[in-house]
Each structure stands twice: as C-alpha cells, then as structure tokens.
Image (spheres, rainbow, N blue to C red):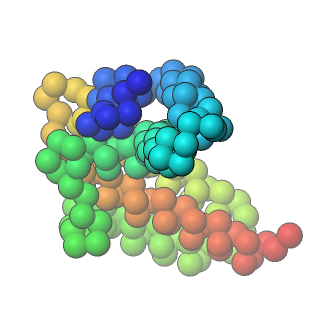
Amino acid sequence: MQLAARDDFELFGLEPRYRLDRAELDARWKRLAAQVHPDRHLGQGAAAQAQAMQWALRVNEAYRRLRDPLQRGAYLCEQRGAPIQAESNTHMCMAFLGEQMAWREALDEADEEAAIDQLQALVKRRQHGLFDTVARELDDADGSPQRAAQAVRSLMFVARFLQDIERRRDALFPL
C-alpha cells in the first residue's frame, strides 16, 4: 500500500501526467478505498481505527483532485514549480481579456435561449482548447509549467463564466 506516498500520483501508482485514463484511476481508487476503509479495521483498536480514517480521507481527497481536470492541472503546476496563485496572480494575456469582455457583453445581451446556447458552445470550445494546452504544456517534453499555470488560471475564469451562463439561463427561462 502506497499510503506514505509523496504525492497523489504515487499514492495511486500512476505516472505524474496530466493525461490520465479515467477508468484506470477509478479502478485504482476503488481498490485503495477498499483497503483503507475504516470498517476493515474494526476490532483493531481506536488507534488503528483513527489511522484508517486518516488514510480513507487521504485517498478520497487525492482521488477528487486527480479526477477533476482543473484541479489536476493546478496540482501538477504546483508540483512543477508554477503555483497557480489564483488570488494574487490575475494576469491574463490581452487576447483572453478581450475574449472575456466579448463573452460578457454577449451574455448581457442574450435574451433568447438560442443565443445563450451559442455562447455556451463557444465558451466550451475555448475551454477544451485550454485543457489541451494544459495537457501539452504539462506532458510534452518541451512543455512549460508556467504556460500551463496561465492556462489553468484562464480555465478557472471559464468555469465561473459557464456558471454565469447557467444563472442567466435560469433567470430568463425559469422552470
């Protein structure tokens, strides 16, 4: 059991890469979770029970981080010396700032569901492109963790903006 692992990838016995096989991650999580489940340690005393609970929390926390592409990207950037620092580093390239402004304007003007759907599709395409950038910058030999960190910060904005789109949709077209 790799519970004393240095990082989430080692805990799951995976190479530290952005591109993961989700089915493999899920299968490894199920095996690890079964090994450390506190019920397996009943009757071994309070200390063993408490340690099993800590292990279970560690395994579940690592699994949540690795299965989420945004969290996984941020985690790898941090590991590779390019912390995201989302609260203090809000620098974005001018082109992306321009995109944000255009999206915000389009959302404010959208009053039909088709316009909202079109904007959402546009933003999701951009999101997929940013995820591809993160994968390339973190996994390819000539990649840059700093460029990956910039893409992750952009993805954080995109995730919030997609929520804004849903709020606008709900406000205009309540169920």
Say which of 174 and 112 sits in front.
174
Say which of 53 and 111 sits in front.
53
The location of residue 110, given as percent across then percent down, is 63, 72
Placement of the C terminus among the 4 image quadrants? bottom right
The location of residue 50, given as percent across then percent down, is 50, 49
The answer to which quarter of the image holds residue 168 is: bottom right
The location of residue 173, given as percent across then percent down, is 79, 72
The answer to which quarter of the image holds residue 72 is: top left
Residue 94 visible here: no
Q: Horizontally, is 39 left or right of 33 in the view?
A: right
Residue 91 visible here: yes
Residue at the location (55% across, 43% down)?
45
Q: Residue furthest right?
A: 175
Say which of 98 and 138 sits in front.
138
Placement of the N terminus among the 4 image quadrants? top left
The location of residue 123, given as percent across then percent down, is 50, 54
Say which of 73 and 161 sits in front.
73
The answer to which quarter of the image holds residue 114 is: bottom right
Residue at the location (50% across, 66% down)?
161
